[in-house]
């Protein structure tokens, strides 16, 4: 088969399998093996697939993923969210829609510490929803604010999705990716705050809560130990004191010590964290192993090169091609988990990006930003369904309130896409690129 026909066959088989409920990782392996049968015998394809799965996991950097997942779960169970919410409420002050802004700030803080958009949506949303309801906020609007801002933690480090992209892209620096995510993540949060401000002014959501100087100082003081995690882990990685994997292990030790110090984590809770982290990490690592098979098939059949030539034949205009990639990634993000999407589409679209002169670091941030949009959109948006569940609402009214946030975030995505300096400024200042 020609590369384009192989690619089409791979896509059709994969979609067919997952449409019947086959797990994504299994669908990746089966569709890859069936595609490569036109090139090599069945028994050889199984042997090569097994070798590729083993080699795909034989990487020290992958240990960072279970450690960061465990650190996030410990933070979530250890009562960190409440301290960050209190800090966020102080930072939001008495601006129109201050509780909505506090929700967004808290998601940015907690999401960056836990590295999980779902954990942020659940922990912060469950804390903020009763407060917003008490002050007369529309429940669907409150849920939309929480859902739209929760994925900021995927961009603001430490973020395990950047580690996945680093591996699948062929070794883009994790430290550079971490620093490249800061400004786009903040921009995403600011875009949500602009929408929340406009809505709050229109509906007269003005704060009735005031804080004394002592309460403000206490909120900052209580949040400092949690925020120090970011300073220690990210500072150590960027300074070259330790690797991302070692930083993730330090994050676990620090969050565990902090939770026991606060006396908010029992041994039973710790066991639950370990079990939950093991299950989550197992799913992610098996996805990485299965994607190694697909990467081998893509390389063997020449599918990425064929897709690159096909896209370049559509237009030679860099602006058009980047917009086309964004539209593809937004569409992919609406029905595919972020890790699976990164593993499958990075080998396909990265050659196109490099062909038109796009920095792989900038492209990685653009990809993750697109996946943040996918996290909040149906039919597979995990943050969307967690946020709706926390708010105890039906999907339809929340999706309606999400539309302005989606538009604002997409505009922020375009700014990040077409102004590379937003992503590359900090890595260049710190001489990471």
Image: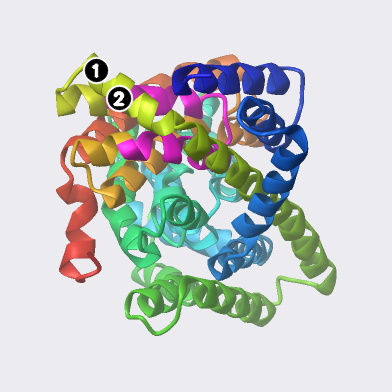
| Residue shown at the point (63%, 26%) measured from the top left | 35
Secondary structure of the residue carrying tag 2 is: helix
Q: Kindly tell me whether residue 206 is visible in this rendering.
A: no
Residue that badge 2 annotates: 309
Q: Is residue 346 magenta?
A: yes
Q: Is residue 11 above or below residue 41?
A: above
Q: Where is residue 293 shown, x and y percent of the image?
A: 62, 43
Residue that badge 1 annotates: 313
Boundaries of the magenta span: 323-351
Q: Total label count? A: 2
Secondary structure of the residue carrying tag 1 is: helix
Which one is nearer the viewer's eye here, 44 or 281? 44
Q: Residues within 10 Å of mark 1 (few under 14, many from 20)?
A: few
Q: Where is residue 36 shown, x and y percent of the image?
A: 62, 30
Give the spatial CA distance, label 2 vs label 1: 6 Å
- Residues under numbered marks 2 and 1 in contact, where contact means CB atoms less than 8 Å apart: yes
- From the image, give the main secondary structure of the stretch colored magenta: helix
């Amino acid at each position: 088969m020609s590369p384009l026909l192989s690619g089409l066959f791979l896509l059709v088989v994969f979609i067919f399998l997952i449409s019947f409920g086959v797990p994504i990782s299994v669908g990746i392996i089966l569709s890859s093996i069936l595609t490569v049968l036109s090139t090599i015998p069945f028994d050889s394809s199984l042997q090569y697939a097994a070798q590729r799965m083993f080699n795909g996991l034989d990487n020290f950097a992958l240990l960072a993923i279970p450690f960061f997942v465990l650190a996030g779960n410990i933070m979530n169970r250890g009562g960190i969210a409440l301290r960050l919410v209190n800090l966020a409420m102080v930072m939001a002050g008495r601006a129109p829609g201050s509780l909505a802004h506090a929700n967004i700030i808290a998601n940015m803080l907690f999401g960056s510490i836990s590295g999980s958009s779902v954990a942020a949506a659940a922990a912060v949303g469950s804390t903020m929803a009763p407060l917003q309801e008490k002050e007369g906020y529309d429940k669907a609007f409150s849920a939309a604010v929480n859902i739209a801002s929760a994925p900021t933690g995927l961009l603001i480090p430490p973020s395990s999705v950047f580690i996945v992209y680093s591996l699948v892209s062929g070794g883009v620096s994790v430290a550079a990716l971490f620093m490249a995510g800061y400004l786009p993540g903040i921009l995403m949060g600011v875009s949500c705050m602009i929408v929340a401000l406009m809505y709050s002014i229109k509906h007269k959501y003005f704060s009735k809560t005031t804080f004394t100087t002592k309460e403000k100082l206490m909120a900052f003081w209580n949040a400092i130990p949690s925020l120090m995690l970011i300073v220690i882990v990210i500072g150590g990685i960027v300074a070259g004191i330790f690797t991302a994997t070692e930083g993730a292990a330090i994050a676990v030790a620090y969050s565990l010590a902090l939770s026991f110090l606060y006396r908010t984590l029992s041994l039973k809770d710790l066991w639950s964290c370990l079990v939950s982290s093991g299950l989550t990490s197992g799913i992610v690592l098996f996805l990485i192993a299965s994607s190694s098979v697909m990467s081998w098939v893509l390389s063997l059949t020449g599918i990425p090169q064929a897709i690159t030539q096909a896209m370049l034949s559509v237009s030679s205009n860099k602006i058009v091609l980047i917009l086309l990639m964004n539209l593809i990634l937004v569409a992919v993000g609406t029905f595919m988990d972020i890790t699976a999407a990164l593993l499958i589409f990075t080998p396909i679209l990265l050659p196109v990006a490099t062909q038109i002169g796009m920095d792989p670091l900038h492209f990685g941030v653009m990809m993750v930003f697109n996946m943040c949009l996918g996290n909040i959109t149906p039919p597979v948006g995990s943050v969307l369904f967690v946020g709706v569940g926390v708010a105890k609402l039906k999907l339809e009214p929340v999706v309606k309130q999400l539309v302005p946030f989606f538009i604002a975030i997409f505009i922020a995505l375009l700014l990040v896409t077409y102004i590379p300096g937003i992503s590359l400024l900090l890595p260049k200042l710190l001489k990471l690129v």
